[in-house]
Every structure is written in C-alpha cells, then in structure tokens.
C-alpha cells in the first residue's frame, strides 16, 4: 500500500513581475500607449466629473473612469508624485489615451476610461484626467510592495438615496470611508458589496456616492447590485478589468439594453477575485442564470486559479445571510445552485451584500455545515477540502438596515432556513449574526497562510446614520437590542453603542493545504539580510521558511520544521513501515529553482512504534546531490517493532544559490507511507 495524496489544488502563483506586461497573465487588458494630446482651437475644455480610481487586472494597474460634458479626445496623465513640482507634471509624464462613449440620455454627456499600466511598486503617483488646457484637479494614489501580505476593505450597500435623504446617506458613506482609511491607510483595495446607489440612473445619487476623494486615492472594486442593474450608469461610472459582457451574464440577456451586467476577474497580490452579476440568476428573463456564472467561475479558476494562493468571490445577493432577504426565493435558488460548485473549485471566501446586516457563515461544504462541531463565533476556523466561509456585510452608509429574522422549519441544509442546533436563534449556516443599526465595514487581512476577517464599526448611533435619523429604524433601538428607553423619555436609550473602530466579529481562516502533502513557502528577499522565521500550526498549515538569509551574496539559506507527522501502528504482524517524502521544484510564477536545494534532518519527536529516524540529507548546494527532489526516508521501523504511535519531524534546511531571483516561492512536499 502506497498512499500518496497530493494537495487538493496546488496553489503556486505565477504573477506578473514588476514592469512586465499583463500578457503574461494571458488577459487582453490594454497596454498603455504614450501619446500627447494637444488642445485644438475647436475644443473648448470639457467639464469633467465623477472621477473614480478602479482596480486593474493586477497590482501594477489602475483603471480611471470619469464623465465628460464634451465628446473630445481625452487622457489620463500620470507621474510619480516626487516628480510633480508646484503642481506641474514633468515633461516625461506618461499619458494614456482614453476611450469611452456617449452616456444614456438620463445621464447626459460622455464617459471615458483609461487603464494605467506598468506601475512600479512602493511609489506615490499623481494623476489627472482631461486634455491640455483642460485638466481635472490632480489626484494621487500609491502602490505598495507587489509581493506578500496586504489588507483590503469590503463595504456593504452604500445605496445612496435609500433613506430618502441623499445628502445624509452620502455623509454616512463618506464618513465610513474616512474612518476606515484613517484606521487602515495602507489598505490596498476597496471592495464593493453592490448597490452603490438606490436608483440606477439617478446621477445625483452617483454624485453623492463619488463625493469622497478616497475613491480617487484607493482603487474601487465595483460590484453590481439589484439597485444598480436597471440602467447603464453603473457601467458608465465603473469600468472593470477582464470583463465578460456576454448576453448570458446579463439578467435580461441583452447587454445593449438599458441595463448593466457582466462578470469580471483580476488577480491582486496572490488573491484571485471573481466578481459576479448576481442579478442574473434565472433564465426566465433571458439571461444565462446561475449556470452561466458557474461556467464563468469554473473557466476563470481553471485558467488562473493556480496563479493565486486564494480565491475570493464577490457578488451582491447573499445566499447565507441573517435578515430580511434570508428567505427570499431567489436567494434560495442561488443557495442550491452555487455552494457545491464553490466547494469543488476550492473557493476560500465569498463576500456578499444585499441583506444590510452582518453575518459570517460556518465552514460550508456542498451546501451543508461542514463540521457539526464548529462552535458559534469561533475565533479560528480550519476549513477542510471544500470548506468555504461566506460573509455578508452590513450597511456601510447607514442608509438602510434590515433586522435579523427568525429561522423556520425548512431544514438545515440546501435551501433550508432552519435553526442552528447550537444556537437556535440563528440560521443553521451562520456562525455570527449582527445588527446594531450602526455603520460597519469588513477588513480582510491577506497573510501567507491565513485570511483574517473582521467586521468593524465605522459609526455609532449618532449622525450621520440616516436610517436611524429619519425613522426607518429610528423608533427602534440602536445598538440596544433590548429596546429600552431613556428613563422618563420616549426616546430609545442608545447609550450602549460601542465606539467607532471596535470589532463586531473577528475570525482567522486557516486554509486547507492538502491531504498528506505539505506546502512549503520561502520568501527570497531583494536585499540581504532579512529576518526569517516560521510558523508551525496544529493543523497542516503552510510550512513557512520565512525570508531567506543572504550569505555574502554566495547563497541564501532558510530553515524550518516539517509539520509533525503522527504515525500509529497497531497491527499484529509487527511488520515494518517507513515514511518517505520528496519535494517539487520551488516556483513563483515562471521563476523556479530546484527542490534539490532542500535538505533535512529527520527526528523522532515522540518515540513509539519502533520509530527510528533516517539520516540527514544535505542540500544540493552543499553536496551537488539531489537533496529532497527524490524520495528520502524520514523514519522507519523494523520487523517486530512494538505497537504504538510516534511523532515524527524534521528540521528543514534550504540553501540556494545567490543568483535566484527575488520572489515568494512555494513547493509541495509529498509524503508517502510504505507498509508491508
Ligand atoms: Fe440589494
């Protein structure tokens, strides 16, 4: 018997190196073309508005979209901020020609967009839109390292205008952006949960949505909601990368109609994001329904999933949520159509909106709770193969809140909305549910071996909090579920509100790393020497060798320890056993180095079952041998060994030539048990 189990889906990455074109990723996004656009006598400067910075196809790109009063040739001009002196762009500033078209009649004017490409890491940039003689104000954004950890923020349903008071909804939205980005100035993406506005083509609502300059400093990751779909303004305002505008991805099957739609994807620093138009879920209106989205997600993950460490899906209509929309018939359809596909494709996290309340699901596999023992509100979750966590965001603007609703008798899997046996007030699928009538946002920390999800309060009961101010929920409690009143008053006692920045919920998701295999990661630094370290988890987490240390430019070295392996043998035959392993090449996209550079020193951590450690194997750097690139013994027991169990480990030693390129490399160690 020789059980050799490889990880469910090997996740190495093949990202675009700094300065490379997006062609490496096989996408069709435009590459920037430098050109100068002179003003002509006939061109009066166009009035420019609605400028928004959007995400590009990867971390070296941004997309800028805006409105123009005139149908003139326009562009985006970009330069490192350090070269912009007294507001003057340098002569060698890069200019990207804009494309676009006429807006629909109710919007008026024209739309323009540009994909800025070939950005450098760790650089502050200034940019402006328009043309010579008629530039917009100068805005700025910054890039950060194109490798490693980062944070992004997720915002539910700003839905400006939903309270009936556009200005106050906009004020709450702007305040959440300010609060979130003051607390997280280095966040790299602002991800939408959909429903940017209440009424699809009402430009006054879009103006309020776009009022904050934060949306010109940090890239917006647009998501279409049911309130955005009924017009073209969403597409006119928010151009997105790698967008499939096939008829099947529009709810009515007609991209030319006065509706918005389409699905898109991008990879940002090892996370593959796929953003879906969940308005299209049935074929009865003419679109391709959920089946079309499933085909799209499957194709994107098949083609690009191995280029990222994590897969995050984003769409508007929450399928596991706690409030008014939890039992909607359309969401029940999606809840049947999607989960098994997402489990099979190895999705790590799903971000949703629409229910204007916060929830974090249990680990869901194939439409059912994966682990009956997962307790409500667990601080750490360890999804096995197929385990997916679904998060629903509360309102980021305060324009509308929905209250938590009660489970029913419709079952505890699939489309059911039955109670959680461990917490009967909650739906079976939710680990955490929350509604306090205060604004919140979700912070996601992307780390080498975990995703940390937090729901954070960005407001209190106080204004701006339009749904409370104007009575939608104002006569009920705010942050006071007991709905008690100020003594001697008819006003609710809102004094229990917790402060801005406090945490509603926090969970660390430890992703699955395969069956009997172990993924190993080492970061090779650009400049010596760096700190290095490693993490050993109680589960089969990533074996991180940390950052390799440079030795006088001759070689890099990194060390770590294998995740402990427990062997137990209770056979009567007392027959021999042996554990061996070999490692793949280390890869970071197209950059690789041989697994032969990994050596080890096996150890028996807890003795038993006759276990004896095999001898050490040197890195090929030291002995020009094959290291662990060929199967090597970890431990064994001879015929007649005692029954029992042993815990095996190994000290790992990676030595690689100093010529290896900077990168974050991963390899898979496959472990094999030989039993006679
Ligand atoms: Fe919605």
Image: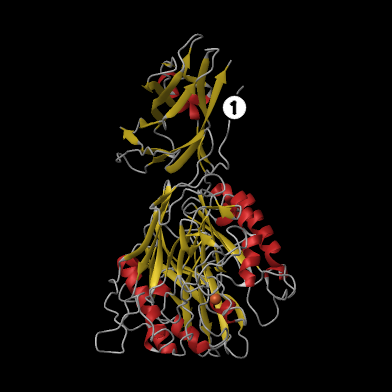
Q: Is mark 1 within 8 Å of ligand 1?
A: no
Say if 374 sits above or below 67 in the image. Answer: above
Quarter of the picture containing the C terminus is top right
Check the image and name the residue furthest to the left.
487
Above or below — where is 327 with respect to 609?
A: below
Q: Secondary structure at mark 1?
A: loop
Task: Name the residue beneath numbered marker 1.
Answer: 3
Q: Quadrant of residue 648?
A: top left
Whether residue 72 can be seen here: no
Q: Residue furthest top?
A: 640
Of 123 and 175, the residue lying toward us: 175
Badge 1 crowding class, 10 Å Cα cut-off, few under 14, some 14 to 19, many 20 or more, is few
What's the residue at 40%, 69% (across, down)?
441
Residue 21 lies, in percent from the top left, at 54, 55
Quadrant the N terminus occupies: top right
Colour convention:
secondary structure
- Left/right placement of residue 532 relative to residue 576 reads left
Residue 495 x %, y %: 26, 78
Split into quadrants, the picture shows ligand 1 in the one at bottom right
Residue 483 vs residue 584: left or right? left
Q: How many marks?
A: 1
Relative image position of residue 174 (x, y in whole percent): 38, 79
- Residue 300, percent from left and from top: 63, 55
Residue nearest the viewer, comparing 614 with 181: 614
- Residue drawn at 69 percent across, 75 percent down: 255
- Could you say which quadrant of the image residue 478 lies in? bottom left
**Residue 612 in sight:** yes
User: Which residue is located at x 57 percent, y 48 percent?
Assistant: 386
Name the residue at 38% across, 53% down: 379
Above or below, 252 against 589 in this view is: below
Report the front residue among 119 and 593.
593
Q: Tell me if residue 257 comes above or below residue 288 in the rendering.
A: below
């Amino acid at each position: 018997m020789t059980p050799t189990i490889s990880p469910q889906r090997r996740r190495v990455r093949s990202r675009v190196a700094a300065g490379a074109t997006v062609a490496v990723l096989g996408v069709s996004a435009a590459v920037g073309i430098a050109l100068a656009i002179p003003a002509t006598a006939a061109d009066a400067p166009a009035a420019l508005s609605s400028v928004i910075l959007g995400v590009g196809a990867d971390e070296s790109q941004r997309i800028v979209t805006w409105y123009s009063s005139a149908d003139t040739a326009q562009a985006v001009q970009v330069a490192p901020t350090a070269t912009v002196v007294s507001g003057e762009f340098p002569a060698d500033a890069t200019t990207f020609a804009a494309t676009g078209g006429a807006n629909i009649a109710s919007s008026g004017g024209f739309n323009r967009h540009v994909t800025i490409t070939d950005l450098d890491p760790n650089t502050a940039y200034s940019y402006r839109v328009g043309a010579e003689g008629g530039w917009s104000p100068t805005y700025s954004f910054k890039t950060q390292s194109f490798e490693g950890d980062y944070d992004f923020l997720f915002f539910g349903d700003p839905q400006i205008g939903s309270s009936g008071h556009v200005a106050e909804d906009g004020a709450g939205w702007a305040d959440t952006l300010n609060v979130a980005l003051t607390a997280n100035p280095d966040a790299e993406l602002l991800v939408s949960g959909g429903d940017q506005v209440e009424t699809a083509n009402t430009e006054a609502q879009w103006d309020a949505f776009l009022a904050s300059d934060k949306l010109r400093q940090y890239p917006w990751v647009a998501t279409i909601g049911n309130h955005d779909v009924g017009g073209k303004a969403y597409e006119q305002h928010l151009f997105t990368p790698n967008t499939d505008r096939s008829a099947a991805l529009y709810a009515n099957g007609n991209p030319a109609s006065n509706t918005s739609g389409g699905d898109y994807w991008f990879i940002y620093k090892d996370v593959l994001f796929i953003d879906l138009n969940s308005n299209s879920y049935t074929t009865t209106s003419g679109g391709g329904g959920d089946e079309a989205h499933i085909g799209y997600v499957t194709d994107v993950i098949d083609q690009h999933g191995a280029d990222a460490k994590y897969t995050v899906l984003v769409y508007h209509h929450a399928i596991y949520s706690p409030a008014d929309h939890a039992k909607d018939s359309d969401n029940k359809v999606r809840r049947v159509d999607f989960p098994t596909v997402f489990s099979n494709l190895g999705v790590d996290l799903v971000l949703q909106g629409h229910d204007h309340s916060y929830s974090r699901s249990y680990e869901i596999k194939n439409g059912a709770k994966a682990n009956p023992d997962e307790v409500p509100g667990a601080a750490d979750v360890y999804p096995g193969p197929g385990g997916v966590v679904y998060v629903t965001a509360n309102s980021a603007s305060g324009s509308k809140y929905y209250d938590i609703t009660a489970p029913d008798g419709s079952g505890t899997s699939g489309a059911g909305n039955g109670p959680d046996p461990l917490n009967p007030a909650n739906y079976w699928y939710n680990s955490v549910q929350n509604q306090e009538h205060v604004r919140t946002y979700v912070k996601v920390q992307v780390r080498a071996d975990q995703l940390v999800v937090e729901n954070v309060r960005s407001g209190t009961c106080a204004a701006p909090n339009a749904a409370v101010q104007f009575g939608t929920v104002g006569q009920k409690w705010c942050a006071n579920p007991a709905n008690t009143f100020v003594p001697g008053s008819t006003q609710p006692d809102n004094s229990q509100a917790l402060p801005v920045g406090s945490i509603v919920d926090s969970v660390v998701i430890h992703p699955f790393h395969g069956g009997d295999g172990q993924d190993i990661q080492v970061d090779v630094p650009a400049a010596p020497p760096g700190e290095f370290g490693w993490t050993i988890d109680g589960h089969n987490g990533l074996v991180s060798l940390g950052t390799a240390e440079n030795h006088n430019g001759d070689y890099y070295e990194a060390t770590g320890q294998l995740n402990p392996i427990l062997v137990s043998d209770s056979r009567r035959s007392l027959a021999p056993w042996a554990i061996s392993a070999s490692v793949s090449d280390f890869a970071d996209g197209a950059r690789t180095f041989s697994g032969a550079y990994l050596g080890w020193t096996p150890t028996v951590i807890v003795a038993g079952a006759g276990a004896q450690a095999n001898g050490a194997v040197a890195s090929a750097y030291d002995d020009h041998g094959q290291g662990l690139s060929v199967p090597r013994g970890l431990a064994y027991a001879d015929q007649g060994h005692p029954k029992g169990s042993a815990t095996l480990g190994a000290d790992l030693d990676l030595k690689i030539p100093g010529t290896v390129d900077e990168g974050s490399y991963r390899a898979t160690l496959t472990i094999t048990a030989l039993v006679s």
